[in-house]
Image (tube, helix red, strand yellow):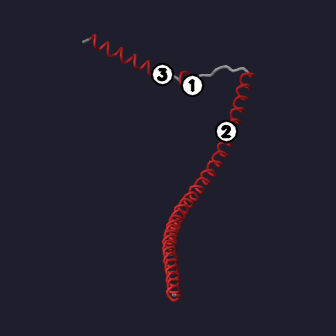
């Protein structure tokens, strides 16, 4: 029991010591590093160059975003125009099909008319030839 009591006191003192050591202001402060003036100048110049480069990149990004916005707007306009042209093409294609059908129908009607006219011409030619033959036959019979 005495031993356990001693062990508890020792553990308490150890925790207290660690707590004191951890909260020490010397240990809690930032570490400092010695820097020569030429190194500091070089670091400042590097920082300025990087800042300048960063600003240039930011300006370039803004220009690229503006270009992208303009390109997207043109794309939307082109898509709209393309849609309108597609609808117009479909409409004109329908009209062309209708006109083609009308021409084919007219051609069929003209061919039918041509066949009928040819039959009529042949019929009239046969009637004329028959009339000539009958007139010649009548003239021969009358001459006898």
Q: In the rendering, at what x and y percent does residue 119 appear?
A: 48, 74
The one of 104 and 61 positioned closer to us in this rendering:
104
Q: Nearer the viewer, residue 86 or 1?
A: 86
Q: Which residue is mark 2?
A: 57
* Disc 2, SS: helix
- Gap in Å between the C-alphas at discs 2 and 3? 45 Å
Place of residue 135 in the rendered image (x, y in percent of width and height, measured from the top left): 52, 85
Cα separation, mark 2 vs mark 1, equals: 37 Å
Foreground tag (2 vs 1): 2
Disc 3, disc 1: CB below 8 Å? no
Pinpoint residue 121: horizontal percent, then vertical percent: 52, 76
User: Which residue is rendered at x = 55% and y = 63% of the image?
Assistant: 88
**Mark 3 neighbour class, 10 Å CA radius: few under 14, some 14 to 19, many 20 or more:** few
The residue furthest top is 3
Crowdedness near tag 2: few (<14), some (14–19) or many (≥20) residues, C-alpha within 10 Å: few
Q: Relative to residue 2, is residue 127 drawn left or right? A: right
Residue lying farthest left? 1
31 lies left or right of 51: left
Q: Is residue 137 above or below residue 64?
A: below
Residue at the bottom extreme of this rendering: 142
* In the depicted structure, whether residue 54 falls above or below residue 112: above
Marks 2 and 3: CB-CB under 8 Å?
no
Q: Which residue is mark 3?
A: 22
Residue 86 sits in which quadrant? Answer: bottom right
Q: Name the residue beneath numbered marker 1.
A: 29
2 or 3: tag closer to the N-terminus:
3
2 or 3: mark nearer the eye:
2
Q: At 53% across and 86% down in the image, what residue appears?
A: 139
């Amino acid at each position: 029991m005495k031993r356990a009591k001693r062990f508890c006191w020792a553990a308490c003192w150890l925790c207290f010591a660690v707590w004191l050591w951890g909260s020490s202001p010397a240990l809690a402060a930032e570490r400092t590093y010695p820097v020569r003036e030429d190194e500091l100048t070089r670091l400042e110049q590097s920082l300025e160059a990087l800042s300048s480069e960063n600003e240039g990149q930011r300006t370039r990004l803004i220009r690229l975003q503006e270009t992208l916005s303009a390109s997207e707007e043109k794309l939307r306009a082109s898509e709209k125009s393309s849609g309108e042209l597609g609808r117009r093409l479909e409409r004109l294609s329908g009209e062309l099909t209708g006109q083609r059908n009308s021409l084919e129908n007219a051609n069929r009607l003209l061919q039918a008319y041509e066949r009928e006219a040819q039959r009529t011409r042949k019929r009239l030619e046969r009637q004329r030839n028959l009339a000539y033959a009958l007139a010649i036959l009548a003239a021969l019979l009358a001459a006898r």
